Structure formats: C-alpha cells, structure tokens
Amino acid sequence: MRKSIAQQLAPLGVLAIIAAVGGLRGVRTASLEVGAGVVAERGTLEEASAQTQHQPPELMLPPPSPLSVAESLAAMRVAPGFRVDCIASEPVIEAPVWMSFDEDGRLWVVEMRSYMPDIEGTGEKLPSNRISVLEDRNGDGEFETSRVFMDGLMLPRGVMPCYGGALVLEPPSLYFCKDSDGDGRADGKDDVRIKLLDGFGGIENPEHAGNGPIYGIDNWCHFSQHNTEVRFDGRGIEKRGTSGHGQWGITQDDRGRLYYTPNSNPLLMDVFPKHYGARNSNMSSVTGMGENIGQEAGTTWPIHPTPGVNRGYQDKVLREDKTLASITAACGPSIYRAGLLGEDFRGDVFICEPAGTLVKRIRMSEKNGVPRGENAYNGSEFLASTDERFRPVNTCVGPDGALYVCDMYRGVIQHKTYLTEYLKAQIRARNLETPLNMGRIYRIAPADFKPRIMPKLSVLHEEMLVELLSHKDGWYRDTAQRLLVERGAKGVERRVREMLASGEDWRVRLHALWTLDGLGLTGPDDVAAAIADDAPALRAAAVELRAYSVNALPNEELDRLVSVERDVSVRATFAAVMRDGGGGGGEAGTERMRTQLNQRTHALLHAPDAYTRDALLSSMKGVEHKLLAQVLLWGKDGELSTWPWGGADEYSRKLFATLTACIIRSGDAGKLELVEIAAVLAQTGDERADLLYKRIASEQRLEADEPKVFGLSGEPKKWLAVAADSGNSRAADFAASAIYFDWPNRPAVKRPKKMRSLTPGEQDLFAQGEMLYGKCVGCHQPEGEGAPGQAPTLVSARILLGRPDNAIKVMLHGLEGEYTYGESKYAGSMPVPAVETDREIAAVLTYCRRSFGNVAEPVKVEDVSRLRAATRGRTKAWTREELK
C-alpha cells in the first residue's frame, strides 16, 4: 500500500526555477521575503506578525513597482562591451518560462500564464496557457510577428520544434503537435496532436517534474528531472530509462554531455550518458550522474539588496550589504557554443539566478574528461538588475550567436504549496500579487551588434545542410544534423563519411558520426575510425553507437580503452557498454572472448576513478554476486585471491561497499550467494569474512530494538556450518545472525522482538504520514533514495532515525549545510516541509522512521508540540553540526 500511494503522489512537481525560488533551496518569492527571518517556520499569522516586529529595519524594503521595458533595461548592468535589447514583451508574450529556436530562426515560447494568479493559486489549473511563435521577418532585431501555435494548455513545461511541428510537454503527457491546415495553429480538427508518452508531473505542484526536451547530439530527446528519454521519428517514439535528476533547464556541450542547474548547486553534469546510469536499480547512486562540477561558481554579486531570499535571515546567506552571497535559485542553463560574444566565451555556461535578479557566466575548464566551472568574474556578474521583478528563468543561444534570456517578470513566484501565512501577509502588504502576466525576452550581444535576417534552413537542399555540419556555431551543426535525420537523407552518405574521415575540427567529425548513426548508416569502418580518433569525444561516441558491437573492435583497441585511455568520459562510457557489447551487440559468446571480458572487467574495476567503476557496475544488475565471488574468492590463476588488490585503500573499500549493497538489493538469490561467500572465507580463517559479516549484520540491524529479517532463496548451509562449529571464532556471531535469516520452508524460529507493534492510534498516524509523504517525494523520491543535487537519502539517515527531537527540529525549522550523495558533495538546504500541524509532522516522521527499511520508534504529537513551544523564537534552520 505504501509504495503504490507514494508512486501515485510522486508526480507532484514545479519549474525548478519556481522550485528554486520556491520551497527547495531558493527564494520563496522574489521580493516578498523582506524580513525573511520567519520563512523557515510555518507558523500562524499571529506568530509571523510577532516575528516580523523583530526584523532589522534594513530588511523592510518598500513595495517594488513594476517597471516598463525601458525602465527595466535602464536598471540592468551588463559586462563591458555588451548591450541588452528587449526583443519581445507583454502583451505579445506573458509569463514566458521556456524558449527554443526552430530551423528558420523563429522563437517558440512557452507561456505559463495561469501560474499563481493569487496567493491561493485560484484558477491555476485553468487551461489558459499557450505556446507562441515569434519571428523577426525584416532583420531589424525585433520579433514583430507573433502567432499562437497552441493555447488552452494546462501548465505547459517545454517545446522543441521538429518535423514541421513541435514536441510539446503539457503535463502529464508529451505530444507531437503540427499545423496541418495552414492557419499557423495546431488546435484545429485537422491538425496533428499525437500523445507520445505519459508520466510527466507538474499539475498539482509544478516544482519537481520533467521539463524540456532538447535534441541531443545522439539524436535522442533529453529531459531534465524525468526518468525517460525518447527518440522520435515523426510518428512514434523509442524510449529508454534514465536517471531522473536535474531541475529546471537542461543543456549540452559540444560533446553532447548533459548539464543541469538545481537551485543551490550552480552546475551539475553527467560524466557519461545518463541512460547507462539508470540500468542497475540495485545501485542507490552512480558516481558521475549529476556530478557537482560548479562548486567554485556559487558566489553571487547582486547589485541591490536581496533580503527576500529563502534563508536571508541566516548567517552568511546575506552579506552585510544585504545582497545574496551564494546561488540559491540556479536554473535555465545554456552552454555557449558560438562565436558572437567572443571566442573566450565558447564552452562557458550561462545560468539564471532569479533570486538575485541576475544571469551568471561560469567559466569552464576540463581535465581528463571531467569539466569544472568557476565564476568568470570576481565581484560582478555578466548581467544583473536592480529591478526586483526581473526574473530570468531560462536562456538559449540563437542562430545569430546572441544569448537570449527569458524573463517571467512578476513579483510573486512562490508556489502556494510552500507559502506561509507570514509570506501571505507580506504579499498583501507589499501589493505583490499584481500585475500578472507581464514578461520579456532579452537579447545580449556585443555593443556593436547589427541584427540581420535569421537563416531559413528549411529550404536548403540536403547537400547544403551537410556543409553546415562544419559550421563554427553549435546551433547550425545541431539543426543541420536534426534536419538530415528527419529527412532520412541517405543520399548524402558519401559526403558525410568524407567529413568523418577528414574534418579538421573534431566537432565536425563528431556530428558526421552521429548523423550517420541517425540515418542508420554506421558500420565497422566508421566505428574503427572513431575509436582511433585523437579526440576523446569521437572515442566516447564510437563505443556507444547502437548499430555496432564494441566487442567486435580489435583486441588492441579494447585493451587501449582499458589501460591507456585517460579521458574519464571515454573510459566510463566504455565500461558502461563493454559487457553488453554496446547498443547493438550481445555479450561475447566464445570462451576466449568471455575470458578477455572478465580480465577487462577486473582491470576496469580498479581504474583510477570511481566513474569507471560505477559505470561498469551499472551494466551488471543481477550478477553482482558473481563478480564479488570472482574478486573475493579467486585470483588470476585460480587460487584464493587477496582482497582488496593493492591493500585496504579507500577506493577498494568503496567498491566492496557498492558491490555488497547491490547484492543486498538484488533479491534473495543474490543475498544467499553473499552469505555463502562470507561463510567460505570464515571457514578458511580469512579475516575478510569480517567485512561481509559486518555488512550483513548491519543490514539485519542486529543492534536495533527490532532486527530485520534477511530473506534468502535457500538454506545457507555453509553459514550454518560455521555457526555450528564451536572451534570457529566467528561461530557465535554467525549463529546470532542466522536467527534473522529466512528461506523457503525454514522451520519456525523464535526471534526476540523488543520493539512493540504500533498501536491502532500510531497505525493511523503512519497511514496519514504515508499520504503526506507525497509532498516529499519530489526531492526524496518514492523509496526515500534521494537524488543528486536535490536531497540526500532517508534510508538509514542519522538525523531521521536518531533522537526524535532532532528530526522534529528539522521539520519545524529546516536543515542546511553540505551533504553527501553517493561520492559527491552538494550544498543544500531543506526548507520547512509543507506540513503545518503538530500531528502532520508526527505523522510524516513516523512514516519515514518505519519505511524504506528503517526501524525506529514512532514520533509522538506531544513531542512536536513541546519542541515547537521550546524553539518558538528560533528563525534559523538547524545545521548538521548542531544535531550531532
């Protein structure tokens, strides 16, 4: 019952920008949190008023007036040498949240006009949203022509032009929509509207839900914050599962690697393709998925006081001048893959920070295939504004090479899900509910930029499109490749293959390779050429091409990928596909090939990075116990091996921990193998038996009041033999653990049970908490596993399962500080959850402390009431140090 309800509630979600500016780690409302000392507590209006009286006067800013376009432009400060122009504004567009250029330079804009009409969200679900297409026909730089492609939409979240129409994300579904009757709209009876995929959230709470898509260099359509990606052929889709991380916005670099921006973490990326990272559900986290690469880019420099941020009352969130010190609402990223702004900008990332009313430039560098980002400026930003209603939420790079910025322009951006009585009072007092449905789109270009007529690629012959694969700007290469694939242009094969063989720029060769793949034309010679290419991007692409088995490559090339390759993205991608031969091949069939495969597997397990290890393990779902047996029990020549190779180093310990965790999650058969491996080691007196015993005992929670039963697929004969061997020093431990094993047809066994069952009243509390947990799944996920850059796991969580007082404090006031997810560290802040009463808090905690494999006492309502009273004056979130 618990799982099904949680999964039903899982699609609760908002624009991550809205999430960012909302409940997760961002601003609650751009200007409405003046005196933000109370935002961490969902108290009564009386409590909020009392706390407001204690706010420093400098935090009590006057109501911000909405500015005209000219006034808002005058309030902006852009980096020297650039200028900002408004290319569209209200009433032509209203509340824009997403935009994308098509092949003819037309700008498709998603307008979320129904979002939060008032503080109660009255009418938010009305189908009053639309997608508009803007066009600059005369080349003067102003998009003077606008037509509504679709209206009557409910909270749309993305649009991607393709096949003469567009993929449209209107939750909970993805559609292909096309104007077929020539009126410019896709809402007539003869027009095309094909539902392609369901499962997207974003209706009840548009916060943690899929958004996008973007067309990837691999010819797949990728989403942020969704667990599926699709390959669309104009009629239907092929789909594959992926990791579901990210928040609002997604972008790709010249190699096709994906990047995201979740709130307090300026930039995350996938070191290897994320569909490989999602294959093994036994892995709780995969190193390299949502890798936190922008930690050095978090500092911000707004040009006006910004007390209205989610944690503005906390130490070090605001500087002495009351400006935001660090990123809190990162969203809408774009990697700059053009030359107009200057070659120094190529490869850098632009992200939006609506809390600080600014757009940040992140300077990128790369070492061994792993990018890193840092602030491009010290003490300033690429673009900043003193207009508190300037809400940059998305960016894109146009065909002209300029940077386009999507400004939702409004005072209230906090969703009702997280709106406190205090914030409601502030909104009313500062007249922030209106005006609604303003919005602007800005273009940033060099000061001497002269607009020109946008290109019209749709009229080009296929031969001309092929030549655009060598264009210096990424928009042209991406669009030309997409059009060639859409047209099924197999007649250009010879020329494309020439570019693969002789293109001077690796980017040209890469697009040629993926174009051939999109047309179904890749063959052994193409893969062999790419795998031997000097550019890591070509080598990485070669090993994941769907049409050809990587195992068919020459042994010397495969061995080079294992032992010589230094680019982590390449080696990790190879590790991910090696065991299944890549997208198109099967696992090696001959004994010799299997032997070579095992040798390469062991070598990759001990590569000098965790990305490669986890990429390999992602391909081994269900056979992790076999790998552990090989590694622990047998050496290269068949004798008992020594584990870990190279000594008890940190890397080997992590590998051991990951493998055993996967086996425990894999099912009873794998767990039986794990238990028996431990017994074999114990029978030989091998001290490594203790590693496995401690891991199994930890899973059983033998020290807890109520240990867990460890299910096995059969009788653990070797383990029981050790338990019965009075001469074995581990016998007592093995016997105590064996009590909590279970297997088919095992005779009844008396198990000490210290923890009482829930009373009827506590069972009611648990059931209520199960329903309320639906408000938490966006971050913590249905099974409490958490997500990169969003939230840590609740499984065996120290603060959750320790003294109830600590967990209650977090629910009352929030939690902030650095945390670890997998092997990456993230800056994070848990806001006060959207549960208000003492009973609701007790219910959620009771549910979480008794779910996801957790075993702990329920939480009493009276304890919540006691702590609320004891901490009533507190306005800061708790830190992990305080709750030790």
Image: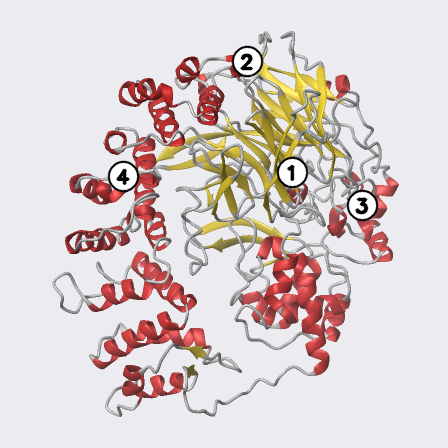
The residue under label 1 is which amino acid type? Arg
Q: Quadrant of the N terminus?
A: bottom right
Q: Position of residue 246 (x, y in %)?
A: 54, 44
- Identified at 30% across, 29% down, the residue is 535
Instruction: Determine if residue 884 is in view.
Output: no
Does label 3 or label 4 sit earlier along the sequence? 3
Q: CA distance from mark 2 to mark 1?
A: 26 Å
Residue located beneath label 1 in the image: 157
Instruction: Please state if 731 lies on the left or on the right of 160 as rendered.
Output: left
The residue under label 3 is which amino acid type? Gly
Describe the element under mark 2 as helix, strand or loop: loop
Describe the element under mark 4 as helix, strand or loop: loop
Does label 2 or label 1 sit earlier along the sequence? 1
Closer to the eye: label 3 or 4: 3
Does label 4 or label 1 sit earlier along the sequence? 1
Q: Position of residue 482 (x, y in %)?
A: 47, 26
Q: Which residue occupies the foreground of this view, 744 or 755?
A: 744
Crowdedness near tag 1: few (<14), some (14–19) or many (≥20) residues, C-alpha within 10 Å: many
Residue located beneath label 3 in the image: 121
Closer to the eye: label 2 or 4: 2
